Every structure is written in C-alpha cells, then in structure tokens.
Amino acid sequence: MDHAHPIKKMAKLGLNQLQRFQVELEQGLGIIDYPVPPNSSMRKTSSRSIRHYYISGIQTVMPIVTCALHQGIALNERIRILDFGCGVARQLLHFTRRYPNPAYYACDVDETSIAFVQKAYPQVEAYVNAFHPPLKYLDASFDLIYSVSIFSHLNREDQKSWLAELARVVKPGGYCFLTTEGMAAMGHLTSTFGMEEAACARKLAEQGILYKEYDFLHDSIKNQNTFKVASLLVGIEGSYGNTVVAPEYIRSEWTNADFEVVQIIEGIIDYRQDLVILRRKR
C-alpha cells in the first residue's frame, strides 16, 4: 500500500484517467447508468474495480435498509437521512436510487470525496466536516443516521465523542445504524495485531476493544496535500487505525443517557462488519 510517494500518486492519477475513458465509453453504450468516482477514490473504500464498488454498495446498503424498514423507518417518506463519513457515495448511490423521497445529507473529512458527491449527487446536501466534533447540524436534525466503516477506525475516546455528537443531531426516537468490526473481521486483522486469530479473540474478550493505529499514519498525514485525490487519509487530524469491538463492549459502553442498543447483527455488512442499531431515547 502506497502512503506518500509522489511518483506512485502520479501513477494513480494515470489510472484515474484510464478509468474515466472507460466510464465515458460504457455510459455511452448504456452499460453504466450511475456516477463513478475516480479510481483512486474508489480504492479508499477498498474497491479496486467499478463492479466491486457497485456490488459492495448493495451488500452494505441492503442490511441497513432491511433493518430500517423492520424498525418502522419510513424510507418512502420525506424524512431526513445523514450519511456520516459518506466517502464517494458507495451507499448513497443505492439509497438515493431506491428511496428518492427522503432529504439526504452527507459529510466526510475528505474534501476530494465531498467534491465528487456534490457534483454527482446535487440532490444531496454534502459538506466537509472536521475530524473532531461538532457537526454543523442543529440538534435533533435527522430521523436516520447511518455510518459505514468509520467506527471501525476510531479509538475509544473518538468513538465516545462521535457517539455523543450523533446523539445530539438525531431526533428523539430516531436511529443510528453504525458498522463496526468484531469477530467476523478478526481473520483479516491478525497481522495488524501481531497475533493468531484465537489469541486476538481472547484479548478482545478480555478488553472489549482492540485498537492499533496505522503505522503509516503520520507519513500519510504529512503528505496528504500532494495530489489529494490520490492521497490516503485526507482530512485525518488525529489517531486513526484498525478498531475491533465486541458486542458486549458496545452494549456496556455505548448505552448511555442518550442511546439504547436495539440490536447488533454480526458479520452482516459486506460479509465482514457488524451492524449496530442504536435508538435515541425520547
């Protein structure tokens, strides 16, 4: 994985140009009928192909939609929905196509991602938020907030501060659908934590949360202003890495005066992440 080298970033820009030609051709032929972000931006969401970008979006959105409908959230009505940490609209693509009636809002720390969303999805009100709270929204602004692969990168302290902020901007009785990494993701993270999967599982059971800051974090932050669209971790201004949390930890630490944990469904998001359903207390 490249984190800083300008020559490699220039190569990514070349791939962006090649993909742009491919997209223009396939859109002209009617093969692609949706906005496609630059190749380097897709790769920030672990999608190395247009096909994976599209399909993984479906695999992520459908569990959220199914659970939202089960909770009685009126996705066909003019409710207000926030995509927190929207990236390059991998989820917004499918939400806005299948449920066009809600008012959609989106935010992300990466200004290049937000530039794409603003151009490709003019019906979505998107802006660049800071790495730490607060958001610009008023109290009790949203009926539903969802966030994919954000809390799987935050340390314990930042998780708490963002949970408090999301509780502020969701309406009483409203919902937050947040993805986390737990045991279903552990097999992908053994090298990150430097131990076998069984040892990782034991440590997670003991501590409730495991966090490992990216080794390349500081170099990446230092070089994020060079060819930003091809840079990783644009907008990151604090600790960031891999985070694994146990359901027991979530039920204990995320339940407070504002939120109640409605359900935790393990491994349902793109075959890897857990889905945590929180309801704002009235």
Image (tube, rainbow, N blue to C red):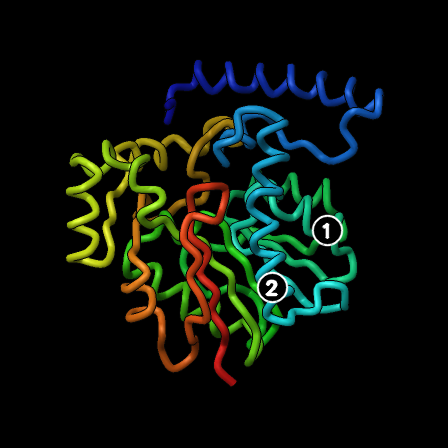
Marks 2 & 1, CB-CB < 8 Å contact? no
Q: Quadrant of residue 105?
A: bottom right
* Residue 220 or residue 271, whichever sits in front: 271
Q: Secondary structure at mark 1?
A: helix
Residue 146 point in image, percent of width and height: 54, 58
Q: Eyeballing the image, is 264 above or below 113?
A: below
Give the number of the disc on residue 155. Answer: none
The mark lying in front, picked from 2 and 1, is 2
State how far apart marks 2 and 1 are (Cα): 15 Å
Q: Quadrant of residue 184?
A: top left
Image position of 224 (left or right of 72):
left
Dot 2: few (<14), some (14–19), or many (≥20) neighbours within 10 Å?
some
Q: Residue at x 60, y 63 (%)?
A: 68
Give the number of the disc on residue 68. Answer: 2
Residue type of the residue flagged with mark 2: Ala
Q: Residue at x 76, y 64 (%)?
A: 76
* Residue 194 or residue 170, whichever sits in front: 194
Q: Is residue 194 something that shows in the picture? A: yes
Q: Secondary structure at mark 2?
A: helix
Q: Nearer the N terminus, badge 2 or badge 1? A: 2
Q: Which residue is most to the bottom?
A: 282
Residue 78 point in image, percent of width and height: 76, 68
Q: Residue at x 50, y 73 (%)?
A: 279
Residue type of the residue flagged with mark 1: Thr
Image position of 157 (left or right of 262):
left
Residue 192 point in image, percent of width and height: 24, 35
* Residue 29 or residue 182, whichever sits in front: 182
Q: Eyeballing the image, is 14 above or below 53?
A: above
Image position of 138 (left or right of 26):
left
Q: Eyeballing the image, is 232 above or below 184?
A: above
Q: Which residue is mark 1?
A: 96
Residue 132 point in image, percent of width and height: 40, 58
